């Protein structure tokens, strides 16, 4: 079944079709949630909550082709709220036991650099950068996910790339 058939079946209440839709993009869905929440347990909770909310509201989806963009926007909003909640309650301490030696060896330097860069960007810049360059969404899809005009996405990306190019996000070392 293609995406249109699966969405229409899901809108008719077919849970199996809805699960098939999510299974097709499960890696991307998990990575997005994990990027926002910073740990696998909260990411899984956010995915569960987003899936329940999406299934309850799938009849509101007018264009079946936009299912994944629509679902990701729900997931991003839930993940943001979860991250804010965790930040208020506790200081984040990475779950080092979740990392395997292969994970550590693979892309350690890049991960540290990306985390450092993301830390110095504001929330709006970070969201656009993650969705565009780390998750490969199109500008139109990012605009839909974040609920802002495409022109705003372009200007934020321009601002972020200038910051990265000229190193304006780091503290001056003198």
Image: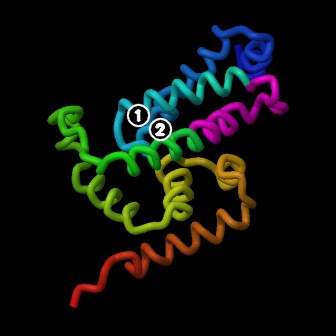
Q: Which residue is mark 1?
A: 42
Q: Which residue is mark 2?
A: 33
- Residue 101 lies in what quarter of the image? top left
Depth check: give the residue in front, 91 or 63.
Answer: 91
Q: Quadrant of the N terminus?
A: top right
Mark 1 is surrounded, within 10 Å at the Cα level, by few (under 14), some (14 to 19) or many (20 or more) other residues, namely some
Residue shown at 65% from the left, 66% from the top: 154
Q: Which residues are magenta?
A: 57-75
- Residue 151 lies in what quarter of the image? bottom right
Q: Are marks 1 and 2 in contact (CB under 8 Å)?
A: yes
Which SS class for mark 1?
A: helix
Q: Is residue 78 magenta?
A: no
In the rendered view, tell whether residue 169 sits above or below residue 103.
below
Give the mark nearer the N terminus: 1 vs 2: 2
Indicate left or right for 75 with 149 as reference.
left
Indicate left or right for 155 with 65 as reference.
left
């Amino acid at each position: 079944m293609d995406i249109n058939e699966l969405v229409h079946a899901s809108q008719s209440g077919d849970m199996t079709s809805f699960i098939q839709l999510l299974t097709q993009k499960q890696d991307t869905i998990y990575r997005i949630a994990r990027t926002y929440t910073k740990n696998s347990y909260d990411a899984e909770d956010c995915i569960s909550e987003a899936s329940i909310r999406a299934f309850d509201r799938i009849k509101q989806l007018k264009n079946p082709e936009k299912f994944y963009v629509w679902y990701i926007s729900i997931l991003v909003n839930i993940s943001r709220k979860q991250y804010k909640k965790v930040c208020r309650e506790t200081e984040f301490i990475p779950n080092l036991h979740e990392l395997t030696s292969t994970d550590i060896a693979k892309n350690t330097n890049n991960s540290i650099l990306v985390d450092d860069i993301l830390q110095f960007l504001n929330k709006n810049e970070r969201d656009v950068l993650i969705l565009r360059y780390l998750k490969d969404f199109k500008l139109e899809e990012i605009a839909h996910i974040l609920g802002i005009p495409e022109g705003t996405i372009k200007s934020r990306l321009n601002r972020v790339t200038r910051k990265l190019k000229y190193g304006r996000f780091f503290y001056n070392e003198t």
